Amino acid sequence: MTTLFISDLHLDAERPAITELFGAFMHREGRQAEAVYVLGDLFEAWVGDDDPSETGAYVADRIREVVDLGVPVYFIRGNRDFLVGDTFARRAGMRILPDPAVVTLYGRPTLLMHGDLLCTDDVAYQQFRTQTRDPAWQRQFLGQPLAARLAFAAQARAASQARQQGMIQSDRAQFESVTDVTPATVEATLRRFGVDTLIHGHTHRPAVHDLDVDGRACRRIVLGDWYEQGSVLRVDANDRVLESLPFTP
Ligand code: MN
């Protein structure tokens, strides 16, 4: 039996082919898996569980189908869909895990994160993250009318894109390093949790990194995004394989 890990699908109404690829993936592979872990940014944006989006309804149904067959689906919130709440989780039948979370995979304790907490060089983003994870901020935000929340999300997305473009133009190398994980933070995190395996997404830089932490051989597996293709990590008792999922329109 295989455990599946995906992240950074960034599903929204504008890219229906990716939403369908997710549906096909859950139907073909999810149903036969031991468990499915979605490590954040399942959605491009999420402004509250009361948003009657078709993409949200479709995704909830595809997850529910797998859960009803006895396959647990776990979700860690990303920086785009951090407002996914208990109502949506119940509807989809998925369980929300904290970030970070330690799970035992085939006897091996493994640390799971979305990955944005590892990007500590991006001080402005970490401040935004702290602010928007505050329960009082979230209550205030979710108390606004849906239209106002959707407008805020569109504005935040445009501002984030403009900020990224500015960073790329002023210093490409610095942009690459600021938007990737901070190595010292990765090491400190592996040390704090005492595990030797970390799986995360967020940076859209799929890879398997071997590293040494205080003489311990550790491994950091980074999941890929679902822009040009899908990306999945398949783990079983003997193997961990990170692969891309081609589009089959
Ligand atoms: Mn992310």
Image (cartoon, rainbow, N blue to C red):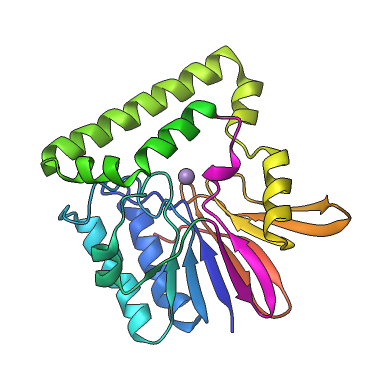
Between 217 and 23, the residue placed more toward the observer is 217
Between 28 and 50, the residue placed more toward the observer is 50
Q: Is residue 145 above or below residue 152?
A: below
Q: Is residue 120 magenta?
A: yes
Q: Residue 132 appears at what percent x and percent y? A: 35, 39
Q: Residue at x 54, y 15 (%)?
A: 169
The image quadrant of residue 91 is bottom left
Q: Residue at x 31, y 74 (%)?
A: 93
Quadrant in the picture for the C terminus = bottom left
Provide the residue span drawn in magenta: 100-122
Judged from this view, the residue extending furthest toward the front is: 136
Q: Residue 23 appears at what percent x and percent y? A: 36, 67
Q: Residue 170 appears at what percent x and percent y? A: 56, 12
In the rendered structure, the answer to whether residue 159 lies left or right of residue 207 reads left
Q: Is residue 234 above or below residue 33?
A: above
Between 103 and 39, the residue placed more toward the observer is 103
Q: Is residue 214 magenta?
A: no
Between 17 and 177, the residue placed more toward the observer is 177
Q: Residue at x 22, y 51 (%)?
A: 48
Quadrant in the picture for the N terminus = bottom right
In the rendered structure, the answer to whether residue 209 lies left or right of residue 223 reads right
